[in-house]
Each structure stands twice: as structure tokens, then as C-alpha cells.
Image (cartoon, rainbow, N blue to C red):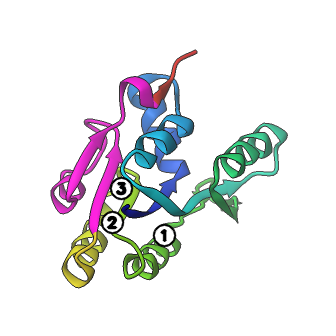
Amino acid sequence: MKKIALFADVQNLYYTVRQAHGCHFNYTALWADVGREGEIVEAVAYAIDRGDSKQQQFQQILRNLGFDVRLKPFIQRSDGSAKGDWDVGITLDVIDAASRVDQVVLASGDGDFDLLLERVIQRHGTEAVVYGVPGLTALSLIRAATRYVPIEGKLLLKH
């Protein structure tokens, strides 16, 4: 049975799914979909902590599914912009996991991860699967992946 490591870029999924589909991402469906491929031996969801109760309930749902939820504080800069980026953390965790698993699954449309997936495939022969929103997932990321799964249909939580 394939060993799989699953990484979810919560902010990217939230904004791209909302922009494209006007709803939320279905993490339960993601877990089930990935679980059909093999055994999920590690799963991490990267989120920003704003400290509100709805968000804490959502984070508990992720934990109940089996995700290790990693939080960074939400930083509001004096110029009004915000900081809350997990790219380096995700990259380090994916590189660490790649030697231990057969498949890395990245749920994100962020093109910054294209080199990461190329490296994981080249160095470890690990499959790299990307789940991303059609039209909002970087083409470079889709090209770098072994397989691309569009976020649509059952992967969406309709209101």
C-alpha cells in the first residue's frame, strides 16, 4: 500500500475556492479521495491564527480528520497589508516527508511550489499530486506535478 503525506495550504484553498466557486473546500472529501490512493501516514494543514471561535472550530474539524494543524499568528502591518505565509514551512515539511513516503499530496495552487515538486520527484522518485482550483492554480505547478486534480464537484462544500 502506498504511503502518502498530505499537505494543505489552508489560506490558499480558502481564497481560491471562494473566488472560483463561492463556497468552501471539503476537507473530508479530500481526505477520502487521497485515502483511496493509499495510507495517509502524515497530514499537515497550515493555517493562520486569528483567534476567533469559528476558526478554532474549523481547526478542530481538521484535527478530527487526522491533520496536524500548524498555526502562525496573523500579522497586520502598519500599512494595512497582512502577513501570514507558510511557504517555507510547507517546503521544509514536504522535503522531509519525501524520503519517507511514496506520494506527496499538496493542496494548493501556489506556483511558488513548482520547484519543490520538481525536486521531490527528481531526488526521491516520489509522486507529487496537486489539488488546485482550475484557473487559479499556477500552470507551472500543474506541469511540475506527477498528477493534477482539479478542485470541483465533490471537493466543494455547497451551502
Inspect the image, locate mark 2, and give the three-letter code of the amino acid beneath it: Phe
Real-space Cα separation, disc 3 to disc 2, in angstroms: 6 Å
- Which dot marks residue 10? none
Real-space Cα separation, disc 1 to disc 3, in angstroms: 11 Å
At 40% across and 52% down in the image, what residue appears?
108
Q: Quadrant of the C terminus?
A: top right
Q: For the residue labelled by badge 1, is the local secondary structure a helix, a strand or a loop?
A: helix
Magenta segment boundaries in residue numbering? 127-155
Q: Nearer the viewer, mark 1 or mark 3?
A: 1
Query: Which of 76/147 is in front?
Result: 147
- Which dot marks residue 113? 2
Q: Residue 8: x, y in percent?
A: 50, 54
Furthest residue in direction top, as rendered: 159
Q: Residue 85: x, y in percent?
A: 54, 64
Contact flag, marks 3 and 2 (Cβ < 8 Å):
yes
Q: Is 91 above or below relative to 14? A: below
- Does 143 sit left or right of 123 as displayed? left
N-terminal of the pair, mark 2 or mark 1, is 1
- Which dot marks residue 90? 1
Q: Quadrant of the N terminus?
A: bottom left
At 36% across and 56% down in the image, what residue appears?
110
- Does 51 sit left or right of 101 as displayed? right
Q: Is 112 above or below relative to 52? A: below
Q: Is 139 above or below relative to 17? A: below
At 21% across and 72% down in the image, what residue appears?
118
Q: For the residue labelled by badge 3, is the local secondary structure a helix, a strand or a loop?
A: loop
Disc 3 target residue: 110
Query: Which of 81/40 is in front?
Result: 40
